[in-house]
Amino acid sequence: MGIENNPFSLEGKTILVTGASSGIGQGCAVMAAQMGAKVIVCGRNEDRLQQTLSQLPGEGHATFAGDLTDASVIEKMVAEVPVLDGAVFSAGISMTAPFTFSTREKFDKVFNVNFFSPVELLRLLVKKKKLAQGSSVVFISSVGGNFGFSVGNGVYGASKAALNSISRLCSIELAPKKIRVNAVCPGMVDTPLVAGFSENITEEERKRDIDFYPLKRYGKPEDIAGGVVYLLSEAASWVTGQAICIDGGITAY
Amino acid sequence: MKTIDEFVALFAEQLDDTDPSTVTAQTKFRDLEEWSSLLALSLISMVDEEFDVALKGDDVKNSETIEDVYNVIKSKI
Protein backbone atom coordinates (compact mmCIF):
# COMPACT_ATOMS: atom_id res chain seq x y z
CA MET A 1 0.00 0.00 0.00
CA GLY A 2 1.47 3.37 -1.03
CA ILE A 3 1.44 6.13 1.51
CA GLU A 4 -1.18 8.01 -0.56
CA ASN A 5 -3.69 5.25 0.18
CA ASN A 6 -2.62 4.84 3.77
CA PRO A 7 -5.31 6.07 6.20
CA PHE A 8 -2.57 6.88 8.72
CA SER A 9 -0.76 9.21 6.29
CA LEU A 10 -0.67 12.95 6.97
CA GLU A 11 0.28 13.72 3.34
CA GLY A 12 -1.14 17.10 2.25
CA LYS A 13 -1.95 18.20 5.79
CA THR A 14 -0.59 21.25 7.60
CA ILE A 15 -0.15 20.63 11.31
CA LEU A 16 0.66 23.13 14.06
CA VAL A 17 2.64 21.79 17.04
CA THR A 18 3.25 23.87 20.18
CA GLY A 19 5.97 22.99 22.65
CA ALA A 20 7.90 21.60 19.69
CA SER A 21 11.39 22.49 20.97
CA SER A 22 11.71 19.38 23.08
CA GLY A 23 10.11 16.27 24.51
CA ILE A 24 6.70 15.07 23.35
CA GLY A 25 6.04 18.12 21.16
CA GLN A 26 9.27 17.58 19.30
CA GLY A 27 8.52 13.88 18.93
CA CYS A 28 5.08 14.70 17.49
CA ALA A 29 6.54 17.22 15.02
CA VAL A 30 9.10 14.71 13.77
CA MET A 31 6.63 11.86 13.36
CA ALA A 32 4.02 14.11 11.71
CA ALA A 33 6.66 15.15 9.17
CA GLN A 34 7.68 11.51 8.66
CA MET A 35 4.04 10.78 7.86
CA GLY A 36 4.03 13.49 5.20
CA ALA A 37 2.68 16.57 6.97
CA LYS A 38 3.90 20.12 6.61
CA VAL A 39 4.58 21.10 10.21
CA ILE A 40 4.61 24.52 11.87
CA VAL A 41 6.73 24.15 15.00
CA CYS A 42 6.12 26.60 17.84
CA GLY A 43 8.15 27.33 20.94
CA ARG A 44 9.62 30.20 22.87
CA ASN A 45 13.13 30.06 21.43
CA GLU A 46 13.92 30.34 17.70
CA ASP A 47 17.33 28.63 17.99
CA ARG A 48 15.84 25.57 19.66
CA LEU A 49 13.02 25.52 17.09
CA GLN A 50 15.63 25.47 14.34
CA GLN A 51 17.07 22.31 15.93
CA THR A 52 13.65 20.68 15.73
CA LEU A 53 13.19 21.96 12.19
CA SER A 54 16.49 20.38 11.14
CA GLN A 55 15.15 16.97 12.25
CA LEU A 56 12.01 17.16 10.10
CA PRO A 57 12.09 15.16 6.87
CA GLY A 58 10.36 16.68 3.83
CA GLU A 59 9.72 20.23 2.66
CA GLY A 60 7.54 23.20 3.56
CA HIS A 61 7.92 23.26 7.33
CA ALA A 62 8.03 26.51 9.28
CA THR A 63 8.76 27.87 12.75
CA PHE A 64 6.91 30.32 14.95
CA ALA A 65 8.78 31.60 17.99
CA GLY A 66 6.86 33.21 20.81
CA ASP A 67 5.57 32.85 24.35
CA LEU A 68 1.98 31.62 24.21
CA THR A 69 1.19 32.94 27.67
CA ASP A 70 1.26 36.37 25.98
CA ALA A 71 -2.16 37.10 24.45
CA SER A 72 -0.65 39.29 21.74
CA VAL A 73 1.63 36.41 20.65
CA ILE A 74 -1.39 34.11 20.31
CA GLU A 75 -3.19 36.73 18.20
CA LYS A 76 -0.14 37.18 15.99
CA MET A 77 0.25 33.44 15.52
CA VAL A 78 -3.40 32.96 14.63
CA ALA A 79 -3.18 35.82 12.12
CA GLU A 80 -0.01 34.45 10.49
CA VAL A 81 -0.67 30.69 10.22
CA PRO A 82 -2.36 29.26 7.14
CA VAL A 83 -5.56 27.23 7.46
CA LEU A 84 -4.62 24.11 9.42
CA ASP A 85 -5.62 20.46 9.16
CA GLY A 86 -4.49 19.73 12.67
CA ALA A 87 -3.06 21.20 15.86
CA VAL A 88 -1.15 19.56 18.69
CA PHE A 89 -0.99 21.51 21.93
CA SER A 90 2.05 20.17 23.72
CA ALA A 91 3.52 23.21 25.50
CA GLY A 92 3.43 22.55 29.23
CA ILE A 93 5.28 22.91 32.50
CA SER A 94 5.54 20.70 35.57
CA MET A 95 5.09 21.51 39.23
CA THR A 96 5.62 19.42 42.32
CA ALA A 97 4.13 20.70 45.56
CA PRO A 98 2.19 18.99 48.35
CA PHE A 99 -1.33 20.37 48.71
CA THR A 100 -0.46 22.53 51.73
CA PHE A 101 2.15 24.32 49.60
CA SER A 102 -0.10 24.64 46.52
CA THR A 103 -0.51 28.40 46.58
CA ARG A 104 -2.62 30.44 44.20
CA GLU A 105 0.64 31.71 42.70
CA LYS A 106 1.66 28.15 41.76
CA PHE A 107 -1.78 27.37 40.33
CA ASP A 108 -1.69 30.56 38.26
CA LYS A 109 1.77 29.82 36.89
CA VAL A 110 0.89 26.26 35.85
CA PHE A 111 -2.64 26.97 34.61
CA ASN A 112 -1.42 29.89 32.48
CA VAL A 113 0.87 27.59 30.49
CA ASN A 114 -0.93 24.23 30.66
CA PHE A 115 -4.54 25.37 30.40
CA PHE A 116 -5.26 29.01 29.49
CA SER A 117 -2.71 29.27 26.65
CA PRO A 118 -3.79 26.23 24.61
CA VAL A 119 -7.47 26.93 25.26
CA GLU A 120 -7.19 30.54 24.08
CA LEU A 121 -5.15 29.44 21.07
CA LEU A 122 -7.81 26.91 20.09
CA ARG A 123 -10.60 29.44 20.66
CA LEU A 124 -9.01 31.95 18.30
CA LEU A 125 -8.00 29.35 15.70
CA VAL A 126 -11.64 28.29 15.50
CA LYS A 127 -13.04 31.82 15.63
CA LYS A 128 -10.71 33.04 12.86
CA LYS A 129 -11.53 29.94 10.82
CA LYS A 130 -7.96 28.67 10.78
CA LEU A 131 -9.01 25.05 11.36
CA ALA A 132 -10.27 23.37 8.19
CA GLN A 133 -13.35 21.16 8.06
CA GLY A 134 -12.20 17.67 8.94
CA SER A 135 -9.29 18.93 11.03
CA SER A 136 -8.12 17.31 14.24
CA VAL A 137 -7.03 18.90 17.51
CA VAL A 138 -4.96 17.02 20.08
CA PHE A 139 -4.28 18.27 23.60
CA ILE A 140 -1.27 16.67 25.28
CA SER A 141 -2.66 16.04 28.74
CA SER A 142 -1.49 13.54 31.36
CA VAL A 143 -2.64 10.49 33.28
CA GLY A 144 -2.29 12.75 36.35
CA GLY A 145 -5.50 14.51 37.30
CA ASN A 146 -8.11 12.08 36.03
CA PHE A 147 -6.55 8.64 35.87
CA GLY A 148 -3.78 8.58 38.43
CA PHE A 149 -2.97 10.55 41.53
CA SER A 150 0.45 10.75 43.10
CA VAL A 151 1.50 12.92 46.01
CA GLY A 152 2.74 16.39 45.18
CA ASN A 153 0.96 16.35 41.83
CA GLY A 154 -2.13 18.41 42.67
CA VAL A 155 -1.45 21.64 40.77
CA TYR A 156 -0.17 19.92 37.65
CA GLY A 157 -2.88 17.26 37.75
CA ALA A 158 -5.65 19.81 38.19
CA SER A 159 -4.41 21.73 35.14
CA LYS A 160 -4.55 18.54 33.08
CA ALA A 161 -7.96 17.54 34.45
CA ALA A 162 -9.23 20.96 33.39
CA LEU A 163 -7.71 20.38 29.96
CA ASN A 164 -9.43 16.99 29.64
CA SER A 165 -12.72 18.63 30.54
CA ILE A 166 -12.51 21.46 28.01
CA SER A 167 -11.23 19.03 25.36
CA ARG A 168 -14.34 16.90 25.74
CA LEU A 169 -16.62 19.96 25.74
CA CYS A 170 -14.95 21.26 22.57
CA SER A 171 -15.42 17.90 20.86
CA ILE A 172 -19.17 18.44 21.14
CA GLU A 173 -19.30 22.15 20.34
CA LEU A 174 -16.90 21.90 17.40
CA ALA A 175 -18.40 18.73 15.91
CA PRO A 176 -20.80 20.77 13.69
CA LYS A 177 -17.67 22.38 12.18
CA LYS A 178 -16.29 18.88 11.55
CA ILE A 179 -13.38 19.55 13.90
CA ARG A 180 -12.41 16.58 16.07
CA VAL A 181 -10.92 17.22 19.51
CA ASN A 182 -9.14 14.63 21.65
CA ALA A 183 -6.63 14.48 24.45
CA VAL A 184 -3.69 12.12 24.79
CA CYS A 185 -2.75 11.33 28.38
CA PRO A 186 0.84 10.14 28.71
CA GLY A 187 2.30 8.41 31.71
CA MET A 188 5.87 9.34 32.63
CA VAL A 189 7.87 9.97 29.45
CA ASP A 190 11.61 10.69 29.40
CA THR A 191 11.56 14.41 28.59
CA PRO A 192 12.99 17.61 30.09
CA LEU A 193 9.61 18.10 31.84
CA VAL A 194 9.75 14.74 33.59
CA ALA A 195 13.39 15.42 34.51
CA GLY A 196 11.94 18.37 36.44
CA PHE A 197 9.55 16.08 38.30
CA SER A 198 12.33 13.59 38.99
CA GLU A 199 14.57 16.18 40.68
CA ASN A 200 12.29 16.00 43.70
CA ILE A 201 12.71 12.27 44.19
CA THR A 202 15.74 10.07 44.68
CA GLU A 203 17.19 7.80 41.99
CA GLU A 204 15.93 4.86 44.09
CA GLU A 205 12.36 6.20 44.07
CA ARG A 206 12.59 6.78 40.32
CA LYS A 207 13.63 3.14 39.77
CA ARG A 208 10.77 1.96 41.97
CA ASP A 209 8.35 4.11 39.98
CA ILE A 210 9.58 2.69 36.68
CA ASP A 211 9.25 -0.81 38.09
CA PHE A 212 5.60 -0.09 38.90
CA TYR A 213 4.85 0.28 35.17
CA PRO A 214 3.56 -3.02 33.73
CA LEU A 215 5.80 -2.48 30.67
CA LYS A 216 8.76 -1.73 33.00
CA ARG A 217 9.95 1.49 31.45
CA TYR A 218 9.08 5.16 31.12
CA GLY A 219 7.80 6.25 27.72
CA LYS A 220 9.70 7.78 24.84
CA PRO A 221 8.35 10.82 22.96
CA GLU A 222 7.69 8.62 19.91
CA ASP A 223 5.46 6.32 22.01
CA ILE A 224 3.16 9.32 22.46
CA ALA A 225 3.65 10.67 18.93
CA GLY A 226 2.29 7.42 17.48
CA GLY A 227 -1.06 8.00 19.18
CA VAL A 228 -1.08 11.67 18.23
CA VAL A 229 -0.40 10.93 14.56
CA TYR A 230 -3.25 8.41 14.60
CA LEU A 231 -5.63 11.06 16.00
CA LEU A 232 -4.45 13.58 13.37
CA SER A 233 -5.00 11.10 10.53
CA GLU A 234 -8.08 10.02 8.58
CA ALA A 235 -7.85 6.67 10.37
CA ALA A 236 -9.34 8.45 13.40
CA SER A 237 -12.18 10.13 11.47
CA TRP A 238 -14.79 8.79 13.90
CA VAL A 239 -12.84 9.50 17.07
CA THR A 240 -13.62 12.62 19.06
CA GLY A 241 -14.06 13.61 22.70
CA GLN A 242 -11.66 10.96 23.97
CA ALA A 243 -8.82 11.10 26.45
CA ILE A 244 -6.51 8.28 25.41
CA CYS A 245 -4.00 7.03 27.95
CA ILE A 246 -0.63 6.05 26.50
CA ASP A 247 1.14 5.02 29.63
CA GLY A 248 2.92 1.67 29.61
CA GLY A 249 -0.13 0.21 31.35
CA ILE A 250 0.15 2.24 34.57
CA THR A 251 -3.57 3.09 34.67
CA ALA A 252 -4.54 -0.53 33.99
CA TYR A 253 -4.06 -1.45 37.65
CA MET B 1 19.20 33.66 56.58
CA LYS B 2 17.12 31.96 59.24
CA THR B 3 18.98 30.38 62.15
CA ILE B 4 19.31 26.64 62.67
CA ASP B 5 16.79 26.86 65.53
CA GLU B 6 14.25 28.57 63.29
CA PHE B 7 14.83 25.89 60.65
CA VAL B 8 14.34 23.10 63.20
CA ALA B 9 11.04 24.70 64.24
CA LEU B 10 9.91 24.96 60.59
CA PHE B 11 10.92 21.34 60.06
CA ALA B 12 8.95 20.23 63.13
CA GLU B 13 5.89 22.08 61.80
CA GLN B 14 5.74 19.67 58.83
CA LEU B 15 5.37 16.66 61.13
CA ASP B 16 2.07 15.32 62.42
CA ASP B 17 2.87 12.52 64.85
CA THR B 18 6.19 13.64 66.32
CA ASP B 19 6.28 15.81 69.45
CA PRO B 20 7.96 19.07 68.28
CA SER B 21 9.81 19.34 71.61
CA THR B 22 11.73 16.15 70.75
CA VAL B 23 12.92 17.51 67.38
CA THR B 24 16.45 18.95 67.42
CA ALA B 25 19.18 19.80 64.93
CA GLN B 26 20.60 16.33 65.54
CA THR B 27 17.35 14.46 64.85
CA LYS B 28 17.84 11.75 62.24
CA PHE B 29 14.67 12.66 60.43
CA ARG B 30 14.57 9.73 58.04
CA ASP B 31 14.39 7.41 61.04
CA LEU B 32 11.16 9.06 62.22
CA GLU B 33 8.30 6.61 62.13
CA GLU B 34 6.14 9.00 60.14
CA TRP B 35 8.83 9.87 57.53
CA SER B 36 7.45 9.46 53.98
CA SER B 37 7.92 10.62 50.42
CA LEU B 38 5.17 13.18 51.01
CA LEU B 39 7.11 14.62 53.96
CA ALA B 40 10.21 14.76 51.77
CA LEU B 41 8.23 16.79 49.19
CA SER B 42 6.88 19.01 51.97
CA LEU B 43 10.43 19.65 53.17
CA ILE B 44 11.51 20.61 49.63
CA SER B 45 8.50 22.95 49.26
CA MET B 46 9.05 24.51 52.70
CA VAL B 47 12.71 25.21 51.90
CA ASP B 48 11.69 26.73 48.56
CA GLU B 49 9.16 28.96 50.31
CA GLU B 50 11.27 30.01 53.30
CA PHE B 51 14.78 30.11 51.80
CA ASP B 52 14.16 30.37 48.05
CA VAL B 53 16.45 27.36 47.62
CA ALA B 54 15.64 24.39 45.36
CA LEU B 55 16.58 21.19 47.21
CA LYS B 56 16.70 18.00 45.20
CA GLY B 57 15.39 14.62 46.30
CA ASP B 58 18.99 13.42 46.59
CA ASP B 59 19.90 16.34 48.88
CA VAL B 60 17.30 15.05 51.32
CA LYS B 61 18.35 11.44 50.88
CA ASN B 62 22.02 12.22 51.47
CA SER B 63 21.32 14.15 54.68
CA GLU B 64 21.19 12.32 57.97
CA THR B 65 20.24 15.02 60.47
CA ILE B 66 18.16 18.17 60.22
CA GLU B 67 21.38 20.13 60.59
CA ASP B 68 22.75 18.36 57.49
CA VAL B 69 19.77 19.68 55.51
CA TYR B 70 20.37 23.15 56.95
CA ASN B 71 23.98 22.97 55.77
CA VAL B 72 22.91 21.98 52.26
CA ILE B 73 20.60 24.99 52.20
CA LYS B 74 23.44 27.24 53.41
CA SER B 75 25.68 25.96 50.63
CA LYS B 76 23.05 26.79 48.02
CA ILE B 77 22.22 30.32 49.12
Image (cartoon, coloured by chain):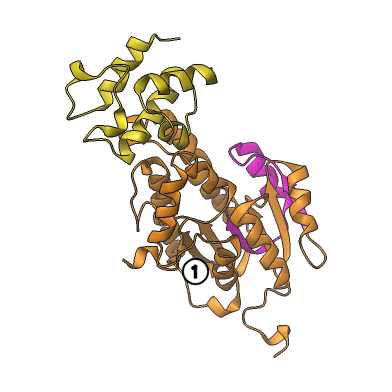
Judge whether residue A116 can be spotted in this image: no
> Would you say A63 lies left or right of B77 here?
right
Q: In the rendered view, would you say A87 is above or below B16? A: below
Residue at which label 1 appears: A176
Give residue A100's position: percent from left, percent from top.
30, 31
Give residue A148's position: percent from left, percent from top.
34, 56
As for residue A141 lying within the magenta part, the answer is: no
Q: Which residues are magenta?
A: A62-89
Give residue A248's position: percent from left, percent from top.
45, 66
Q: Which chain comes out orange in the rendered image?
A: A
> Which of the two residues, B29 or A222, is positioned nearer the viewer here?
B29
Label 1 lies in what chain? A
**Label 1 element class:** helix
As for residue A63 lying within the magenta part, the answer is: yes
Q: Which chain comes out yellow in the rendered image?
A: B
Residue positioned most to the right? A59
> Which of the two residues, A209 or A131, is positioned nearer the viewer here?
A209
Residue positioned most to the bottom? A1
Give residue A134's position: percent from left, percent from top.
59, 72
Question: What residue lies at 45% left-to-right and 50% top-to-bottom?
Answer: A206
Q: Residues within 10 Å of mark 1 (few under 14, many from 20)?
A: few
> Which of the two residues, A53 or A81, is positioned nearer the viewer here?
A53
Q: Amino acid at mark 1?
A: Pro
Question: What residue lies at 72% left-to-right and 84% top-to-bottom?
Answer: A4
Judge whether residue A83 can be spotted in this image: yes
